[in-house]
Amino acid sequence: MNPELEKILMQVQKPSRYTGGELNSVVKDKSKVDVRFAFCFPDEYSVGMSHLGMKILYSLINSRDNYWCERVFAPWTDFEALMREKGILLYGLESFDPLTEFDIIGFTMQYELSYTNVLNMLDLGGIPVLAKDRTQLKGLVVAGGPCVCNPEPLADFIDVFILGEGEEVTLEWMDLYAQAKREGWTKDAFLRAACKIEGVYVPSLYDISYHDDGTIAAVTPREGAPAKVRKRVVADLDGMYLPENFVVPYTETVHDRAVVEVLRGCIRGCRFCQAGFICRPFRQRSIGSIRQQSQSLCESTGYEEISLSSLSTSDYTEIEQLLSDLTDYTEGEKINLSLPSLRIDNFSQEVLDKIKKVRKSGLTFAPEAGTQRLRDVINKNVTEDEVMTSCRIAFEGGYTAVKLYFMLGLPTETMEDVEGIAQLAQRIVDMYYGMENRPKGKAVSVSISASSFVPKPFTPFQFEPQDTMEQIVEKQKRLVASIRSRKISCSWHDVHVSVLEGILARGDRRLGAAIYKAWKDKGCRLDSWDEVFRFDAWMEAFAECGIDTAFYANRRRSYDEILPWDHLDYYIRKDFLIREDEKAHEAATTPNCRQQCSGCGARLEGGVYCG
């Protein structure tokens, strides 16, 4: 470790975020490594170390003797200030070498408000921020993750985007990079070859032209790049690479437990949910594979809690058998079992019996909307009777606290729908006190969490306008005013964060200039943290770049408009998204994939539809 680094670590909060050396971290001999990969998470350590995708790819890359993957996280403001003062470059936690020593700098893009962190981390590491200023093969900047389903706002900064799932494509393009490095290719030669790999998008090989009204006129590929870039999908989840250990942090993280993925994709088709569409097709792991990895992770890390990860864990076809098999192990080893992502409509007494042994507080459900009409608009396919039944099961099982997630600003929403949120919560309170077998001597608590709807690419609502800031605030106030009981509490997301997210989510390449200005001139970074976020600085950056934010956030798109992501193929057909948006305006629902195939376009090899 740099002696100067050791000195300043004693001057910052949580220095263990910056020291490395954790259990199961991988250190290799640099002289025996062909390619060095800096896996950068564009947020601080406690967030990044909770991310399952980073854990998987870290282990995958390091499983190859000639590749070395190290972890890099965004420093907090106190450490960044000292790094810049002392001239210390951002470094990998395993070797303490700066980013300038790495062949590849890779980012996982989980959230739009981390965009400035990418620029800040590159700059802190001594890497030119703009892709055009990086002319050598070494220092290639790559990005993947859910946000790259619309990579265009970051096109000025990233050399290569990886679309879809990384377990197979990562080693393919890294092997190509190793060949290019060995044979002395230029960066341009590598990019022209890499774009031929399915799932690899090279933005510099595409020209974008615009109409006078600001909409896109054409996306034109050059130098042999494909007209449509298709995401990568792992067909067999049991056959893919599965790590048997994770790096164990010295300090507390957001999700401090072993995380085991049980399925990918979603059968539900909620029209607001980007993950539910871009992660299709629906695939499951076998019970034996899940149990084996759960046991291996607990034994190698010492964790005493397992969290089953998916978009909808209770949609696992053998959920009760899975829980039975896992609890045979976890109960004997005194390990907690956590099931996030439970659906209201298939929450049962059997599931409750399994989870109440380890859950000590309340249960969380997501009705998303307060009225049946609006739940039909968003295709939630949950009735009020199912909401009430699930809460009753929970109360009869001894629970007295329920948290309900809703969204404000959904398409076609009225003030009656907003008031319906408070009215539904009140009916749950009234039901509790009307039960003869409720927990005696205990008061009920119903918590409402109301986020603001943000239209996202590759969803039926990608065409819809986002509510303005004034409209969102008015609805938040109406919701609070509609609550009549002290048994009901309410929280909501910062409207400014939602507005910025809405601008960036459906942006095009012209936003790159504003992202750069917000970071370089306005000092924006760590935007997802309330204590650092500066909405006014972002608005100044947009204005100074001549960008009309309403064009991106508050404008309805016509169905024939070329969208910034239309040249990317995430298996979801645009005509399907149009049909679903039209049905939303009729408040008409679509059955889930197990009930009836809706022809979304998500197919496994051989033409078999998911679900």
Image (tube, rainbow, N blue to C red):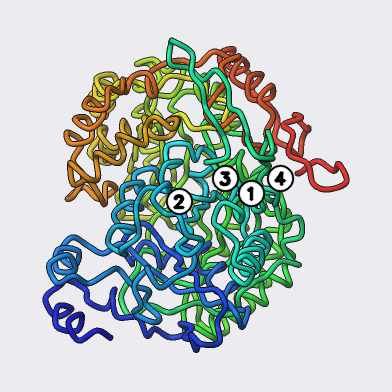
Quadrant in the rendering for residue 90: bottom left
Q: Earlier in the sequence, mark 4 or mark 1?
A: 1
Q: Amino acid at mark 3?
A: Val
Vertical arrangement, residue 111 with respect to residue 15, above or below: above
Task: Reply above or below: 316 against 214.
Answer: below
Disc 3 on helix, strand or loop?
Answer: loop
For badge 2, the amino acid type reads: Met
Quarter of the image with the N terminus in it: bottom left
Local crowd size for mark 1, using a 10 Å CA cut-off: few (<14), some (14–19), many (≥20): some
Q: Are marks 3 and 1 in contact (CB under 8 Å)?
A: yes
Q: What mark, if any, has residue 202 been given in the picture?
A: 3
Nearest to the observer: residue 248 or residue 316: 248
- Whether residue 522 sits left or right of residue 188 in the image: it is left
- Structural distance between the alpha carbons of marks 1 and 2: 23 Å
Q: Which residue is mark 4?
A: 281
Q: How far is the residue under mark 4 from the one under mark 1?
A: 29 Å
Pick whichever of labels 3 and 1 is earlier in the sequence. 1
Check residue 192 in the rendering and tell me which mark sits there, or answer none: 1
Q: Residue at x 25, y 39 (%)?
A: 517
Residue mark closest to the camera, 1 vs 2: 1
Q: CA distance from mark 3 to mark 2?
A: 16 Å
Q: Nearer the viewer, mark 4 or mark 1?
A: 1
Residue 48 placement (x, y as % from top left): 39, 63
